[in-house]
Amino acid sequence: MIKKSILALSFTCALALANENGYFAGASFGYSLGTVSNDSVVNNSESDKSTSGYNISIKGGYEWFYNSSISVKPYLEYTYSSYLNSGSFAKDLTMNIITLNADVSYYFTNDISVFAGLSLGEVFADTSGGYGSDTAFGWGLQAGWTYKILDYLELEGKYKWFDPGLGEKYTAGNTRKVQPDDSHLFSIGLNYKF
Protein backbone atom coordinates (compact mmCIF):
# COMPACT_ATOMS: atom_id res chain seq x y z
CA MET A 1 0.00 0.00 0.00
CA ILE A 2 2.76 2.43 0.93
CA LYS A 3 4.75 1.50 -2.19
CA LYS A 4 1.72 2.19 -4.39
CA SER A 5 1.14 5.55 -2.68
CA ILE A 6 4.78 6.56 -3.12
CA LEU A 7 4.71 5.45 -6.76
CA ALA A 8 1.49 7.42 -7.45
CA LEU A 9 2.89 10.50 -5.69
CA SER A 10 6.17 10.26 -7.68
CA PHE A 11 4.25 9.96 -10.95
CA THR A 12 2.05 12.97 -10.08
CA CYS A 13 5.10 15.06 -9.14
CA ALA A 14 6.85 14.09 -12.38
CA LEU A 15 3.83 15.24 -14.40
CA ALA A 16 3.59 18.49 -12.47
CA LEU A 17 7.30 19.23 -12.87
CA ALA A 18 7.35 18.36 -16.58
CA ASN A 19 4.99 21.20 -17.48
CA GLU A 20 6.02 24.29 -15.54
CA ASN A 21 5.01 27.92 -15.83
CA GLY A 22 7.63 30.00 -17.58
CA TYR A 23 8.77 32.43 -20.25
CA PHE A 24 9.38 31.40 -23.85
CA ALA A 25 10.68 32.88 -27.09
CA GLY A 26 10.26 31.55 -30.59
CA ALA A 27 10.95 32.03 -34.28
CA SER A 28 9.25 30.56 -37.34
CA PHE A 29 9.05 30.77 -41.11
CA GLY A 30 6.46 29.61 -43.60
CA TYR A 31 4.20 30.02 -46.60
CA SER A 32 1.62 32.82 -47.02
CA LEU A 33 -1.55 32.87 -49.10
CA GLY A 34 -3.63 35.98 -49.58
CA THR A 35 -6.26 37.72 -51.68
CA VAL A 36 -6.36 41.24 -53.08
CA SER A 37 -9.73 42.47 -54.31
CA ASN A 38 -9.58 44.62 -57.43
CA ASP A 39 -13.10 45.82 -58.31
CA SER A 40 -14.14 47.98 -61.22
CA VAL A 41 -16.12 51.08 -60.26
CA VAL A 42 -17.16 51.67 -63.89
CA ASN A 43 -19.02 48.42 -64.56
CA ASN A 44 -19.36 47.07 -60.97
CA SER A 45 -17.37 43.92 -61.73
CA GLU A 46 -15.41 42.13 -59.00
CA SER A 47 -12.02 40.57 -59.49
CA ASP A 48 -10.00 38.90 -56.74
CA LYS A 49 -6.32 38.13 -57.19
CA SER A 50 -4.87 35.22 -55.23
CA THR A 51 -1.30 35.76 -54.21
CA SER A 52 1.36 33.83 -52.32
CA GLY A 53 4.68 34.41 -50.64
CA TYR A 54 6.47 33.76 -47.37
CA ASN A 55 6.35 34.82 -43.71
CA ILE A 56 8.88 35.11 -40.89
CA SER A 57 7.89 35.57 -37.22
CA ILE A 58 9.47 36.10 -33.82
CA LYS A 59 7.60 35.99 -30.53
CA GLY A 60 7.98 36.07 -26.78
CA GLY A 61 5.61 35.45 -23.91
CA TYR A 62 4.68 33.44 -20.86
CA GLU A 63 3.04 30.01 -20.49
CA TRP A 64 0.85 29.52 -17.44
CA PHE A 65 -0.45 26.02 -16.61
CA TYR A 66 -3.97 25.80 -15.28
CA ASN A 67 -3.34 22.12 -14.58
CA SER A 68 -0.96 19.47 -15.99
CA SER A 69 -2.88 19.31 -19.31
CA ILE A 70 -4.14 22.84 -20.00
CA SER A 71 -2.12 26.04 -20.36
CA VAL A 72 -2.68 29.64 -21.45
CA LYS A 73 0.00 31.48 -23.44
CA PRO A 74 -0.19 35.27 -23.79
CA TYR A 75 2.57 36.53 -26.11
CA LEU A 76 3.68 39.35 -28.38
CA GLU A 77 4.50 38.43 -31.99
CA TYR A 78 6.06 40.26 -34.94
CA THR A 79 5.37 38.83 -38.41
CA TYR A 80 6.81 39.94 -41.75
CA SER A 81 4.71 38.62 -44.63
CA SER A 82 5.60 39.21 -48.29
CA TYR A 83 3.33 38.48 -51.28
CA LEU A 84 4.66 38.60 -54.83
CA ASN A 85 2.61 39.55 -57.90
CA SER A 86 -0.49 40.73 -56.02
CA GLY A 87 -2.20 42.19 -59.08
CA SER A 88 -1.55 45.23 -61.25
CA PHE A 89 -2.56 47.79 -58.58
CA ALA A 90 -1.04 46.19 -55.48
CA LYS A 91 1.91 44.47 -57.19
CA ASP A 92 4.34 43.29 -54.50
CA LEU A 93 2.60 43.50 -51.13
CA THR A 94 4.41 43.36 -47.77
CA MET A 95 2.84 43.44 -44.33
CA ASN A 96 4.54 44.05 -40.99
CA ILE A 97 2.16 42.72 -38.33
CA ILE A 98 2.58 43.27 -34.57
CA THR A 99 0.04 41.30 -32.54
CA LEU A 100 -0.89 40.51 -28.97
CA ASN A 101 -1.93 36.85 -28.87
CA ALA A 102 -3.51 34.43 -26.43
CA ASP A 103 -3.42 30.67 -27.04
CA VAL A 104 -4.97 27.86 -25.01
CA SER A 105 -3.00 24.59 -25.21
CA TYR A 106 -4.03 21.04 -24.41
CA TYR A 107 -1.22 18.58 -23.64
CA PHE A 108 -1.96 14.97 -24.63
CA THR A 109 1.36 13.99 -23.07
CA ASN A 110 4.22 16.02 -21.60
CA ASP A 111 5.69 16.22 -25.12
CA ILE A 112 2.72 16.73 -27.46
CA SER A 113 0.12 19.50 -27.42
CA VAL A 114 -2.43 21.23 -29.65
CA PHE A 115 -3.49 24.85 -29.32
CA ALA A 116 -5.93 27.47 -30.58
CA GLY A 117 -5.98 31.20 -30.02
CA LEU A 118 -6.78 34.79 -30.94
CA SER A 119 -4.57 37.60 -32.33
CA LEU A 120 -5.15 41.37 -32.21
CA GLY A 121 -2.77 43.97 -33.52
CA GLU A 122 -1.48 46.62 -35.87
CA VAL A 123 -0.75 46.06 -39.57
CA PHE A 124 1.66 48.17 -41.62
CA ALA A 125 1.15 47.38 -45.33
CA ASP A 126 3.16 48.57 -48.31
CA THR A 127 2.82 47.86 -52.04
CA SER A 128 4.85 48.74 -55.10
CA GLY A 129 1.60 49.48 -56.97
CA GLY A 130 -1.11 52.13 -56.94
CA TYR A 131 -2.47 51.01 -53.55
CA GLY A 132 0.57 52.50 -51.82
CA SER A 133 0.90 52.16 -48.04
CA ASP A 134 -1.64 51.85 -45.25
CA THR A 135 -1.95 50.94 -41.56
CA ALA A 136 -4.89 49.30 -39.84
CA PHE A 137 -6.00 47.29 -36.81
CA GLY A 138 -6.32 43.59 -37.65
CA TRP A 139 -7.35 40.39 -35.94
CA GLY A 140 -6.92 36.68 -36.48
CA LEU A 141 -7.37 33.12 -35.29
CA GLN A 142 -4.67 30.49 -35.04
CA ALA A 143 -4.35 26.78 -34.36
CA GLY A 144 -1.47 24.35 -34.29
CA TRP A 145 0.59 21.77 -32.45
CA THR A 146 3.84 21.53 -30.50
CA TYR A 147 6.26 18.67 -29.96
CA LYS A 148 8.90 18.87 -27.22
CA ILE A 149 12.33 17.99 -28.64
CA LEU A 150 14.27 18.74 -25.45
CA ASP A 151 13.19 19.97 -22.01
CA TYR A 152 13.77 23.56 -23.14
CA LEU A 153 13.04 23.31 -26.90
CA GLU A 154 9.86 22.53 -28.82
CA LEU A 155 8.92 22.27 -32.48
CA GLU A 156 5.74 24.16 -33.46
CA GLY A 157 3.48 23.99 -36.51
CA LYS A 158 0.87 26.73 -36.88
CA TYR A 159 -1.88 27.96 -39.18
CA LYS A 160 -3.10 31.55 -38.77
CA TRP A 161 -6.05 33.19 -40.53
CA PHE A 162 -5.63 36.94 -40.33
CA ASP A 163 -7.87 39.83 -41.40
CA PRO A 164 -5.54 42.84 -41.80
CA GLY A 165 -8.45 45.32 -41.67
CA LEU A 166 -6.93 47.37 -44.50
CA GLY A 167 -9.33 49.73 -46.25
CA GLU A 168 -10.27 50.11 -49.90
CA LYS A 169 -8.38 52.62 -52.01
CA TYR A 170 -9.37 54.05 -55.36
CA THR A 171 -6.75 53.77 -58.10
CA ALA A 172 -6.46 54.17 -61.88
CA GLY A 173 -8.24 57.53 -61.96
CA ASN A 174 -10.91 56.37 -59.46
CA THR A 175 -12.01 53.53 -61.75
CA ARG A 176 -10.81 50.65 -59.51
CA LYS A 177 -11.21 49.79 -55.80
CA VAL A 178 -8.27 47.82 -54.45
CA GLN A 179 -8.12 46.16 -51.01
CA PRO A 180 -5.78 43.52 -49.52
CA ASP A 181 -8.05 40.91 -47.90
CA ASP A 182 -7.57 37.90 -45.61
CA SER A 183 -4.21 36.18 -45.17
CA HIS A 184 -3.52 32.50 -44.52
CA LEU A 185 -0.16 31.98 -42.82
CA PHE A 186 1.33 28.48 -42.52
CA SER A 187 4.51 28.21 -40.47
CA ILE A 188 6.92 25.90 -38.71
CA GLY A 189 9.30 27.03 -35.99
CA LEU A 190 11.07 26.49 -32.68
CA ASN A 191 10.20 27.75 -29.20
CA TYR A 192 12.83 28.08 -26.49
CA LYS A 193 11.55 27.73 -22.91
CA PHE A 194 13.46 29.60 -20.21
Image: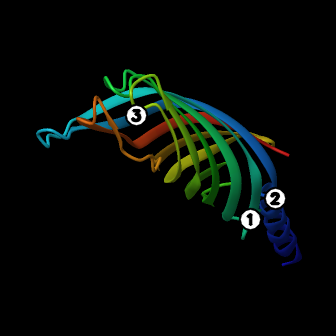
- In three-dimensional space, the C-alpha distance between marks 3 and 1, rounded to whole angstroms, equals 33 Å
Seen at 50% across and 53% down, the residue is 140
Indicate left or right for 28 with 159 as reference: right
Q: Earlier in the sequence, mark 3 or mark 1?
A: 3
- In three-dimensional space, the C-alpha distance between marks 3 and 2, rounded to whole angstroms, equals 35 Å
Residue located beneath label 1 in the image: 65
Q: Position of residue 6 (x, y in %)?
A: 87, 70
Name the amino acid, label 3: Leu
Name the amino acid, label 2: Glu
Q: Earlier in the sequence, mark 1 or mark 2?
A: 2
The quarter of the picture where residue 168 lies is top left
Mark 2 is surrounded, within 10 Å at the Cα level, by few (under 14), some (14 to 19) or many (20 or more) other residues, namely some
Q: Earlier in the sequence, mark 3 or mark 2?
A: 2
Indicate left or right for 19 with 143 as reference: right
Mark 3 is surrounded, within 10 Å at the Cα level, by few (under 14), some (14 to 19) or many (20 or more) other residues, namely some
Q: Position of residue 75 (x, y in %)?
A: 70, 53
Looking at this rendering, what residue extends furthest in the bottom direction? 1
Name the amino acid, label 1: Phe
Task: Please name whichever residue, 14 or 177, is drawn nearer the observer in this view of the structure.
Answer: 177
Tag 1 and tag 2, C-beta contact below 8 Å? yes
- Of helix, strand and loop, which one carries label 2? loop
